[in-house]
């Protein structure tokens, strides 16, 4: 290929490059001009993350050949603030919390910029039309639309004073970098001399293979430095459970799912990508794959793992009272079977990172939700000591559970270690989708009984979960579901069994809710059935049975405090009644369109199930007066960096905006566990509070001041004031400690829980979050389309540390719940991209109203508990309940795509 | 390794095509998505510098849409009601980024069964102009698209324009797309319709086309005949019968079952006629 000279302007600066004119502009911006603010989420025009302005119009940089650029003016997010009003737009994004993980934010901003130039005061629909080409997986879009529509009506950014950070709508501590393109994600940085890594993956779901002459391939291919295979991996088995390390970094002669890594090509970027897959020396013997697991005896010699002859990875069990007997004599019983498919996390940032060897130590920069687990697992597979591996988390462009497992870390780590060269890699979108974990497909059957007066009596629940080819978080799902499958209700008799079964499919792992969204569809669906059978309003039926403080769960745990479900339901009651009534009136008039309102209730235990999961944070101050929070909790967009800073600040007694956050670097922070299971605010947040209080205590001791003293930071001095006098601590005179700090406090919190006995009885979680949501939907009965018009969400969050961020979690969870309900289904080999795999766009989201209930959790920081998964779990049941009021059709399977809904309507006589 | 050519003049472009081996690139919205995760090694003929292929022009009794005309160009152009359906389709092609880059002719050349441009352009009786060193020829759109991802374009030919005849009398048109989400969605079914009528409001020409229900979009000629002479009013939807949809042969896929597609196609055809009738009565745009 002859290179061509291409001259154009970027952000007002003339550039002239020698470049392959077919190169994508996104590539040119990122790798030649260092403008990594333009993100690549799909390289196919499906996600819009790479949106830039060319001559003022929005275009996907991934679809634009450089050869078309001569004479054109390109604007990227890095140059956005130079355009009229655009700095103000960025500020609106910041203040509205429109950026969560921030990976879509540059694309959203650029699309908005093109709109605002033509239309200075757009309305909501115009904003949706203009931003409709950019996907966001975190925010549910509402705050983005509000930010764009608010331009010109400036808000006042909240800078909370000392002692008032908790509860304030403080802007994100890491927010500025997310709106100006400076934030660095996994693919955004690497050492200059880094080689590239390309993974060769199995095209088959089940096969054996043999490898030919790899050294010859290296010798024959200029620019190819190494080809790594299973033989190069010292300890080629990883897995999140200590006793279930079953997944190879590179497959060793056997592949168990399509997309499994087989080889890693390492070398110059162009050289490794120029190799055709067909030219690689791999000989396949394709076998008959085990596609599903719904019939237990269909395994027929096709075990996925020899050590699991029955193909069952794990079972879960909860048994309280005598459910079978109680159901046999129950006055009213509802029963049903429910099904859900694989669901893809669809974070907009594909897996990416680099590794760098420094002597006998290895540094890995990558996108992750769990740096300490990455460290331990990477060390294991590379045969290193844990202390030899340092994980530095990049900014995380969305995780939702999908970045809890190792992905690219051991691959770049292995390559860098063996070659003693920095090695970087980034997954393509199809590669990310085919190789990463998924939500477990499920088949659930359940029977739920109650008395005529409405009191629930018994539940029998049986759930089968397709755990895919490897263990990953399968046991977590089979453990968590029996505990939660009663829903947030008092049921005296519960018998619940779950099985996680292997198949030749992508590993099912962690995805926001760990099986509970699947279980909630069953439980809440049957709640609606029972309510109808006894002629009780669905909301009142739930209110009657809602668990309250002092009552026992299905595991026999008597909840002590912060059980705010009844308050959530009460908060929804007025809207519920008005909207149900309005729907009835609408349906009396309307023909093809019918409306309905449904409700879903949820509870979710914060943290690991019956397992220790401590967090330790520390807070230090250096000689210059810089306060640093050493925060091992990875912010995956939800805002934990900000929440931790707010909590620590109030513990310390100084303003939160003084706190700098170091996040997740295993060399600088202590283990704060993984970002999952609604645990960071509750657990790491408590550790942050304790760290703040500990630092305060130490400062007071230095000043010999009493507890009630107030602190003030003045340059390198701390002024400590009490009733008596003002004392000054000269930080510059104090002896140096760790990382240059002169005073440091730390805090550790491990929420109390107990093991479950053989009947699944015990206290699996220290606290639970509760929520109730109602959805107003409109069904086109002729086409089977379902439009969610409105969603009202009432959540007991204990204490809203940052209401803007809490709302962000609610909105984003609702978007994912809506996707689960109506459109999302991952099919290996068929929906491995973002145009065949559908997630909600900006036009699919209803208007969301959030109601925050604060029933404080005594164990949590300032009463707070987690809010990560609840809104997702309650959404699909509420939507399906709405479809029922609209049409009297019960949906039992997701996604409720138009053809499925229409089939159900047709069967019901529509 | 391939190469890249971006000629300024059409004769250079067709000259290159005559040499063979080139992949034509305009908006890139199909080219790049087909090359995710692999090296780009095509010989590329980038036609975006051929200024003579730009723009929408009125030429006597027909319109010419140059091959570089984008969806956004169609949306922005002041055009009569016969183009309303095409404009509605243009708004449903990807997001604004795609509408700004993608061309109508590229959409036809890609020849996806779900191409948003095909049904409305079938109802506009579009002819496709193909140019080569041997000269140019025009094919009716229905003869240009041969099947799933197959067209009548010879490797030495470039699609240079579309020609759309002007209607004899008043015309109105519509487009409806059914997908599982708003924006960025590949259709389950789509329907385009165009009706011409006389001063008395009687239909003189009817063209309806359905996409995503066969390997290529199809006109519903029996329905078109049945509509002739009918008044443009709310009685139109009841003209539609199951037999009118017999040209369709949808398949089951991830977006919907064949049975559902047939049913939805019938619904959308009725709705499109209903919208046109309502529009003609109220004078409001659909």
Image (cartoon, coloured by chain):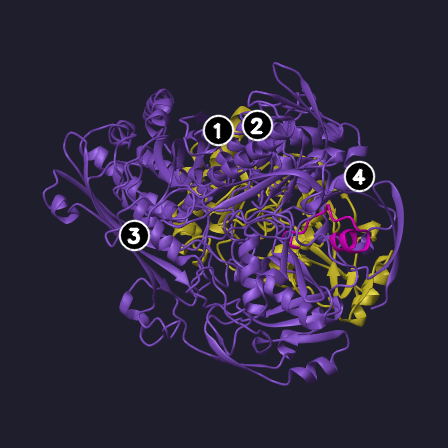
Q: Earlier in the sequence, mark 4 or mark 2?
A: 4
* CB within 8 Å, label 3 to label 1: no
Q: Are marks 4 and 1 on the same chain?
A: yes
Report the chain shown in purple. Answer: A
Q: Earlier in the sequence, mark 4 or mark 1?
A: 4
* CB within 8 Å, label 1 to label 2: yes
Residue found 18% across the figure and 32% down from its top: A534
Per the model, the C-alpha gap separating discs 1 and 2 is: 9 Å
Left or right side of A811 for A197: right
Q: Which mark is residue A862?
A: 1
Q: Position of residue B160 (x, y in %)?
A: 75, 55
Q: Are marks 1 and 2 on the same chain?
A: yes
Q: Residues within 10 Å of mark 4 (few under 14, many from 20)?
A: some
**Disc 1: host chain:** A
Q: Mainly helix, strand or loop, the magenta region? A: loop
Numbered disc 4: secondary structure: helix
Q: Are marks 3 and 4 on the same chain?
A: yes
> Viewer-proximal residue, A737 or A63?
A737
Numbered disc 2: secondary structure: helix
Residue indicated by mark 2: A650
Picture quarter containing residue B77? top right
Residue indicated by mark 4: A79
């Amino acid at each position: 290929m002859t290179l061509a000279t291409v001259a154009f302007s970027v952000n007002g600066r003339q550039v002239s490059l020698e470049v392959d004119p077919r190169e994508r502009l996104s590539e040119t911006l990122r790798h030649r001009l260092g403008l990594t603010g333009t993100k690549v989420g799909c390289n196919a025009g499906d996600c819009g993350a790479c949106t830039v302005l060319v001559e003022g119009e929005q275009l996907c940089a991934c679809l634009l050949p450089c050869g078309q650029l001569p004479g054109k003016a390109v604007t990227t997010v890095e140059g956005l603030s130079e355009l009229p009003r655009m700095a103000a737009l960025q500020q609106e994004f910041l203040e509205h919390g429109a950026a969560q993980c921030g990976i879509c934010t540059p694309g959203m901003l650029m699309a908005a910029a093109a709109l605002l130039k033509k239309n200075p005061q757009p309305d909501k629909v115009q904003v949706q039309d203009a931003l409709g080409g950019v996907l966001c997986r975190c925010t549910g879009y509402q705050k983005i639309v509000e930010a764009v529509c608010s331009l010109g009506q400036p808000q006042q950014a909240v800078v909370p004073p000392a002692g008032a950070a908790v509860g304030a709508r403080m802007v994100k501590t890491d927010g500025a970098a997310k709106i100006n393109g400076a934030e660095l994600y996994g693919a955004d940085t690497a050492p200059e001399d880094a080689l590239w890594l390309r993974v060769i993956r199995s095209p088959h779901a089940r096969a054996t293979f043999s490898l030919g002459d790899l050294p010859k391939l290296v010798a024959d291919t200029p620019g190819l430095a190494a080809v790594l295979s299973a033989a190069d991996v010292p300890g080629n088995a990883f897995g999140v459970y200590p006793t279930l390390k079953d997944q190879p970094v590179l497959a060793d002669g056997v592949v168990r799912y399509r997309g499994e890594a087989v080889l890693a090509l390492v070398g110059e970027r162009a050289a490794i990508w120029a190799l055709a897959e067909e030219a690689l020396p791999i000989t396949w013997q394709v076998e008959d794959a085990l596609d599903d697991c719904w019939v237990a005896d269909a395994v027929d010699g096709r075990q996925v793992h020899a050590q699991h002859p029955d193909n069952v990875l794990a079972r879960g069990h909860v048994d309280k009272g005598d459910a079978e007997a109680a159901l046999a004599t129950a006055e009213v019983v509802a029963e049903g079977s429910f099904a859900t498919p694989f669901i893809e996390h669809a974070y907009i940032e594909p897996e990416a990172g680099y590794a760098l060897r420094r002597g006998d130590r290895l540094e890995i920069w990558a996108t992750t939700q769990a740096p300490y687990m990455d460290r331990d697992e990477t060390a294991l597979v590379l045969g290193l000591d844990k202390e030899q591996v340092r994980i530095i988390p990049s900014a995380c462009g969305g995780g939702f559970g999908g970045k809890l497992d190792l992905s690219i870390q051991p691959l770049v780590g292995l390559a860098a270690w063996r070659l003693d060269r920095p090695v970087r890699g980034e997954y393509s979108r199809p590669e990310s989708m085919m190789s990463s974990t998924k939500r477990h497909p499920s088949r659930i059957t359940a029977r739920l009984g109650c008395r005529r007066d409405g009191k629930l009596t018994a539940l029998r629940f049986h759930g089968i979960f397709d755990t895919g080819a490897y263990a990953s978080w399968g046991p977590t799902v089979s453990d968590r579901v029996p505990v939660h499958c009663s829903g947030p209700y008092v049921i005296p008799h519960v018998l619940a069994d779950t099985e996680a079964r292997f198949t030749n499919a992508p590993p099912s792992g962690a995805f926001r809710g760990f099986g509970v969204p699947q279980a909630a569809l069953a439980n809440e669906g049957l709640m609606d059935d029972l309510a109808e059978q006894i002629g009780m309003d669905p909301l009142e039926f739930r209110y009657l049975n809602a668990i309250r403080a002092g009552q026992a769960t299905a595991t026999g745990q008597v909840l002590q405090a912060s059980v705010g479900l009844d308050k959530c339901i009460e908060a929804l009651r007025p809207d519920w009644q008005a909207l149900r009534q309005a729907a009835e009136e609408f349906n009396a008039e309307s023909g093809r369109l019918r409306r309905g309102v449904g409700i879903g209730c949820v509870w979710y235990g914060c943290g690991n199930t019956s397992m220790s999961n401590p967090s330790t944070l520390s807070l230090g101050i250096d000689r210059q007066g810089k306060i640093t929070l050493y925060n091992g909790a990875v912010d995956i967009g939800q805002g934990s960096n900000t929440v931790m800073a707010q909590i620590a600040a109030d513990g310390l007694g100084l303003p939160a905006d003084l706190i700098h956050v170091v996040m997740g670097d295993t060399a600088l922070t202590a283990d704060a566990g993984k970002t999952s299971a609604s645990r960071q605010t509750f657990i790491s947040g408590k550790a942050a509070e304790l760290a703040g209080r500990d630092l305060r205590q130490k400062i007071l001791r230095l000043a010999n001041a009493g507890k009630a003293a107030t602190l003030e930071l003045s340059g390198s001095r701390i002024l400590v004031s009490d009733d008596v006098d003002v004392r000054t601590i000269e930080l510059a005179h104090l002896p140096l400690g760790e990382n240059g700090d002169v005073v440091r406090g730390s805090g550790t919190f491990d929420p109390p829980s107990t093991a479950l006995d053989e009947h699944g009885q015990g206290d699996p979680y220290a606290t639970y979050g509760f929520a109730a949501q109602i959805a107003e939907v409109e069904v086109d009965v002729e086409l089977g389309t379902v439009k969610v018009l409105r969603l009202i969400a009432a959540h007991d969050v204990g204490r809203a540390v940052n209401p803007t961020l809490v709302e962000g979690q609610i909105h984003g969870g609702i978007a994912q719940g809506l996707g689960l309900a109506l459109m999302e289904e991952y099919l290996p080999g068929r929906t491995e991209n973002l145009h065949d795999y559908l997630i909600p766009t900006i036009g699919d989201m209803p208007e969301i109203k959030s109601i925050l209930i604060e029933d404080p959790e005594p164990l949590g920081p300032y009463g707070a508990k987690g809010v990560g998964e609840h809104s997702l779990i309650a959404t699909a049941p509420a939507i399906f309940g709405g479809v029922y009021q609209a049409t009297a059709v019960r949906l039992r399977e997701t996604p409720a795509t138009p053809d499925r809904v229409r089939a159900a309507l047709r069967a019901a006589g529509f | 390794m391939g190469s890249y050519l971006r000629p300024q003049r059409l004769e250079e472009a067709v000259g290159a095509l005559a040499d063979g081996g080139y992949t034509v690139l305009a908006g890139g919205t199909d080219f790049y998505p087909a090359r995710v995760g692999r090296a780009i090694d095509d010989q590329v003929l980038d036609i975006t510098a051929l200024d003579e292929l730009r723009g929408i022009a009125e030429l006597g009794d027909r319109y010419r849409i140059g091959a570089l005309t984008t969806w956004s160009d169609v949306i922005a152009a002041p055009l009569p009601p016969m183009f309303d359906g095409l404009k509605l389709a243009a708004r449903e092609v990807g997001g604004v980024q795609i509408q700004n880059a993608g061309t109508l002719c590229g959409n036809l050349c890609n020849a996806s069964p779900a191409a948003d441009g095909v049904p409305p352009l079938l109802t506009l009786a579009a002819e496709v102009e193909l140019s080569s060193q041997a000269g140019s020829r025009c094919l009716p759109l229905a003869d240009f698209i041969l099947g799933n991802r197959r067209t009548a374009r010879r490797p030495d030919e470039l699609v240079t324009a579309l020609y759309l005849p002007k209607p004899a009398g008043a015309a109105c048109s519509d487009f409806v797309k059914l997908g599982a989400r708003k924006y960025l969605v590949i259709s389950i079914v789509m329907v385009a319709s165009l009706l011409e009528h006389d001063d008395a409001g009687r239909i003189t020409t009817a063209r309806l086309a359905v996409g995503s229900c066969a390997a290529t979009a199809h006109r519903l000629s029996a329905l078109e005949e049945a509509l002739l002479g009918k008044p443009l009013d709310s009685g139109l939807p009841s003209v539609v019968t199951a037999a009118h949809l017999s040209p369709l042969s949808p398949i089951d896929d991830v977006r919907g079952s064949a049975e559902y597609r047939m049913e939805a196609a019938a619904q959308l055809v009725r709705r499109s006629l209903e919208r046109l009738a309502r529009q003609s009565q109220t004078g409001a745009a659909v």
